[in-house]
Image (tube, grey):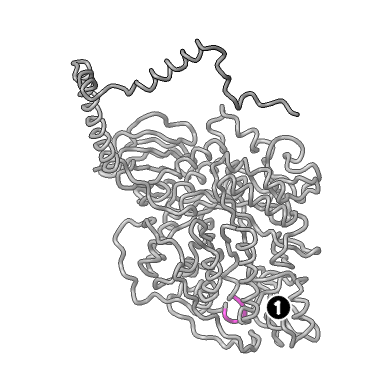
Amino acid sequence: MGTPDRDNYEMAPQSDRDVEKQKQVEEEEAGWTGLGKEELLQVADTPAWNWTRNVLLVLFWVTWVAMLIAAIWIVVTVPRCPDVEWWEKNVVYQVSPRSFYDTDGDGVGDLKGLNKKISYLEELKVKILYINSIFSQANNSVGHPGNHIVDFKGIDTSLGTKEDFQKLMTTATESSIKVILEFIPNHSSDQHPWFLDSKANATGPKANYYIWSEYQGPEVMEDNNPAWTKVEGRGWYYHSKDPSLPDFNYKSEDLRKDITEAMGYWLKEFGVDGMVITNVNSVVDYGIVSESRKRRQSTNDTTAAPAADLTQAMPATTDAMPAPVATTDAMPESKTTMGATEPFAEPGPTYVIHEEDKMLQEYIKQWRSVFVDNSYLGKYRLLVTSGADSIDSAVVQYGNKGQRLADFPLNTLFPDVITGEPNGEMVAEAITDWIEAKKKVDEDTYKRWDSWMVSNNDIWRVASRCSSDLVNVMNTMVLTLPGTPIIMYGQELGMQNNNASEDQQLAPMSWDKTKNANFSKGEPWTSLSDNWESNNVKVLSDKDKKDSELNIFKSLVDIHLEPPVSAGFFDIIKKSSGVLAYLRRLEDWPTYLVVINFSNSVEQLEFPSDRVQPEAEVVLSTDGSFEGDLNPQKIKMKGKSAVVFKYKALQ
């Protein structure tokens, strides 16, 4: 038998004395019922208790009233933050994955390397990662990295695997960083299965996926090389870049469906937050269609171009243009008026959307339906477009007459004025031209969001295109203009181009002064930046170097995130050949005055007292000339410098 569990039993009394004592305890417990009503009133009615009770009651009501007053005061007096979307207020950091960080020593940056460096983006307070083309590439691809696509649903093996990409998405999500991908819809590699099928079979299912003609068209590319290449027994195919990159035929409904499906694949399978659809102007810029666009560019024509005979430049097809797509959940409504300085005026009767731009709008409309279908509460899919021959052709990508298409088009035309020693008046004109072009469309477009850049994967770095001592000036401008700043990787360091024969702006990221700038343990796929030893992350991160490009960039990101800068009104108050000055203001918030001197010379500046307060705080000075509190109405600016003041808004 087992031993009884003693804890489950009470011990029996050991003697009569114990029994008697236990009865006495039980009787006492049964007899006690607490204080009666009369006894309680007598105790509670003492002076001490009355005083304590009254004090506590008064304190309760005083505290409650004070909290109510404080809550009302906060609601009434504290400025409200503008209601902006994640893609409107945050900085976009553009990365060419082949050039960012290599983890396997083959000399090519990869997705694992990008994943490993997410912490660097956190350090920069970057919340949007824009990754250039990662899709499967042809083995014989030369030039135009990322363009030689053979599978729009695959990842290039030199960059990694889909598992690597999924891990990158997970890491980015955990760091509250949105990921958007570049998607190139205009062309594929000539090794893509679609093109191989189209080239081999003039009546096959992919026959009309590309632009074929029995006649060599008159079109030439920008470098004056022929835009048509002959395939014996098949005819001529069109390419707006080079013969290894044949252009798609968007007259083919099947082609449009396949491209749209590929976009949806990345949104659904990997949870990508959006896409930048590049080269969109080339989607309809083929054959004689583009001649009207070229005539308009050269003559600044504002009337519709005459219809051209496309029978020789376009393949015969019965496919219809895409029907308008209903977008009842098209995009969040704009909450601010970016760049507006005066009431909206109705566009004049001369505003015309040209035929090729109408065609492009139809294609964007079809793409947009995929983004809408994959958006839901808490997960908005961003649609950005890139590629235009003129500002007018760019702004129509927003949509018109209430039809929202791109959330915003990239302003890839703006860098055209940022060359050599930029002219303040020309820069100001480029800014206002963009804003005014939106106004010409309609009121809805006028209120739409802007974007600004000075370099990207196709445009030389500003440190090489202008000069290295203008980097801080340019970053100040891009991060304080009204809209989303697009920052090319290494721009925060003032990286220069390399000495490669092409794609010089894609120099590997400069991490430190060790071999290969610590980009790779192997031989890099392209040469290092010309200034990698001085302008790298490790050197410029030194906190004692407050005026380093990287430390100034970090300060500028903080300034950009201030509501008046990220979402406020924009007013140019001074422009000259060397200087550009403007205000960023928002009701009930401090006003920011940004002053930029592009020139080499010292500038003595005065600002009107009705626009600028006599007392202001210096929040950033690129050369350290200004600090503390001072009067910004009269200042002396050194050459190639910028300063940002903050002062209480004028009443």
**The image quarter in which residue 514 lies:** top right
* Furthest residue toward front: 16
* Residue at the image point whose x is 48% and y is 44% from the top: 476
Bounds of the magenta segment: 285-289
In the rendered structure, does residue 3 fall within the stretch colored magenta? no
Is residue 227 or residue 199 the one in the foreground? 199
Residue 588 coordinates in the image, percent (x, y): 30, 44
Is residue 101 or residue 533 the one in the foreground? 101
Residue 88 coordinates in the image, percent (x, y): 46, 54
* Residue at the image point whose x is 73% and y is 69% from the top: 189
Is residue 251 or residue 438 the one in the foreground? 251
Q: How many marks?
A: 1
Is residue 324 toward the left or the right of residue 221 in the image? Answer: left
Is residue 104 toward the left or the right of residue 144 in the image? Answer: right
Q: Is residue 540 above or below residue 316?
A: above
* Residue at the image point whose x is 53% and y is 39% from the top: 554
Residue 504: in sight, yes or no?
A: yes
Residue 583: in sight, yes or no?
A: no
What residue did someone put label 1 on? 228
Is residue 353 toward the left or the right of residue 588 in the image? Answer: right
Q: Quadrant of the C terminus?
A: top left
In the rendered structure, does residue 287 fall within the stretch colored magenta? yes
Q: How crowded is the residue under tag 1: few (<14 C-alpha within 10 Å), some, or many (20+)?
A: many
Residue 459 coordinates in the image, percent (x, y): 61, 56
* Furthest residue toward top: 17
Is residue 87 toward the left or the right of residue 272 in the image? Answer: left
Residue 319 coordinates in the image, percent (x, y): 60, 86
Report the amino acid beneath label 1: Trp
Magenta stretch, overall SS: loop
Q: Is residue 199 above or below residue 114?
A: below
